[in-house]
Amino acid sequence: MIKVEDILRAYRHGFFPMADSREGTVSWCQPYQRALVPLDSFRPSRSLRRVIGEKRFTIKINSAFEQVIRACSQPRSTEQETWLSEEIIEVFLKLHRLGLAHSVESWQNGELAGGLYGMTMGGAFFGESMFFVRPNASKVAFAWLVAHLRRKGYLLLDAQIMNPHLASLGAIEIPHEEYMVQLEHALGKKISFF
């Protein structure tokens, strides 16, 4: 069973957990190329700015963390399995209770429409996963997160592994060595998520 201390130590050294299935073995990943979202240059697309301006969604923080992580753990339509095992979910629920893991949620008409979750340490936010059941719900939550991290003075938004969705949100890839330099700098900050 993964312990909270295991997660904190791993993230400080550039690792994160991934499982091969819901009940599968957990591996510690440290990719050669790390995806991150540059906080200073992120700019929502014109269409996303329009959605945000229409106020379709109400943003809430940590009001449904377990719902969010369990929604994120459902396999995508193009996949058979999930990388979020029950073991990973359980340790992130503990991290949430300790005030280290957070969810940003988009609500519409009283229902959870999408969102994301991640973990904070120092001036770093480690984005774990996002989901949506209504179009643009997770993107609005993401844009809110970036604006919040900027306001609070965070230095690093880690997105772990690049994919087309992250690229569309402005993520870039940097070499592991450069990531570790940025991570060390971010971990030296003392910032509260709230």
Image: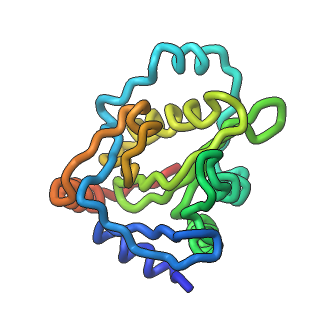
Location of residue 170 (image quadrant): top left
Residue under the image location 45 percent in, 81 percent down: 5
Q: As rendered, which of 94 and 127 lies closer to the eye?
A: 127
Q: Position of residue 85 (x, y in %)?
A: 60, 70
Residue under the image location 69 percent in, 53 percent down: 71
Please indicate, yes or no, whether residue 174 appears anywhere in the rendered image: yes
Q: Position of residue 78 (x, y in %)?
A: 60, 46
Q: Position of residue 3 (x, y in %)?
A: 52, 82
Q: As rendered, which of 47 and 27 lies closer to the eye?
A: 27
Depicted 131 relative to depicted 55: above or below: below
Residue under the image location 53 percent in, 20 percent down: 48
Image side of residue 165 versus residue 175, left or right: right
Numbered marks: total: 0
Residue at the right extreme?
110
Location of residue 77 (image quadrant): top right
Residue under the image location 61 percent in, 73 percent down: 94
In which quadrant is the N terminus drawn? bottom right
Q: As rendered, which of 133 and 11 lies closer to the eye?
A: 133
Q: As rendered, which of 113 and 121 lies closer to the eye?
A: 113
Image side of residue 46 versus residue 153, left or right: right
Please indicate, yes or no, whether residue 98 appears anywhere in the rendered image: no
**What colouring style does the render use?**
rainbow
Image side of residue 124 versus residue 55, left or right: left
